[in-house]
């Protein structure tokens, strides 16, 4: 089984914690890393500057499609960022923990 890391941004930490706790509880993800960021982007024809939170959801390829669907269905943004990182290298002990945590 291979790892799958999915990135998304959220407007506040509370929204990530809510989904993150449910995903870990249901063994869809092993963990989610959350960090505050500043974003500059174009939205509705205007340049936006805002604070957001980035979430790195860590799971396996077995669960990645389900994870992406849940993010899309529960995300507070009209156009959520859902990006998959191709993990080409991961230490064996971390991968084993990731697999055990999502089975």
Image (cartoon, grey):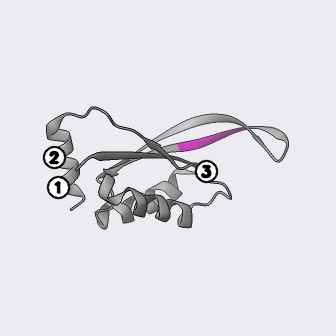
- N-terminal label among 3 and 2: 3
Q: Nearer the viewer, residue 78 or 14?
A: 78
Q: Which residue is mark 3?
A: 11
Q: Are marks 1 and 2 in contact (CB under 8 Å)?
A: yes
Q: Which residue is mark 1?
A: 100
Q: Are marks 3 and 1 in contact (CB under 8 Å)?
A: no
Q: Which residue is mark 2?
A: 96
Q: Nearer the viewer, residue 39 or 73?
A: 73
Q: Position of residue 72 (x, y in %)?
A: 55, 61
Q: Is residue 27 left or right of residue 73?
A: left
Q: Residue drawn 20% across and 52% down? A: 99
Q: Residue drawn 19% across and 33% down? A: 91
Q: Nearer the viewer, residue 80 or 36?
A: 80
Please check the rendered image and state whether residue 50 is part of the magenta-colored stretch, yes or no: yes
Query: What span is colored magenta in the figure?
Result: 49-53
Asked which secondary structure carries label 1, the reply is helix
Q: Mark 2: few, some, or many residues within 10 Å (few <14, many ≥20)? A: few
- N-terminal label among 3 and 1: 3
């Amino acid at each position: 089984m291979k790892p799958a890391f999915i990135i998304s941004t959220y407007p506040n930490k509370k929204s990530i914690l809510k989904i993150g706790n449910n995903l870990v509880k249901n063994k869809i993800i092993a963990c989610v890393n959350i960090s505050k960021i500043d974003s500059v982007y174009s939205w509705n024809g205007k340049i936006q500057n805002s604070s957001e939170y980035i979430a790195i959801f860590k799971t396996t390829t077995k669960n990645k499609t389900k994870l992406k669907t849940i993010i899309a269905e529960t995300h507070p943004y009209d156009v959520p960022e859902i990006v998959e990182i191709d993990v080409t290298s991961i230490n064996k002990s971390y991968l084993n923990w990731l697999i055990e945590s999502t089975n």
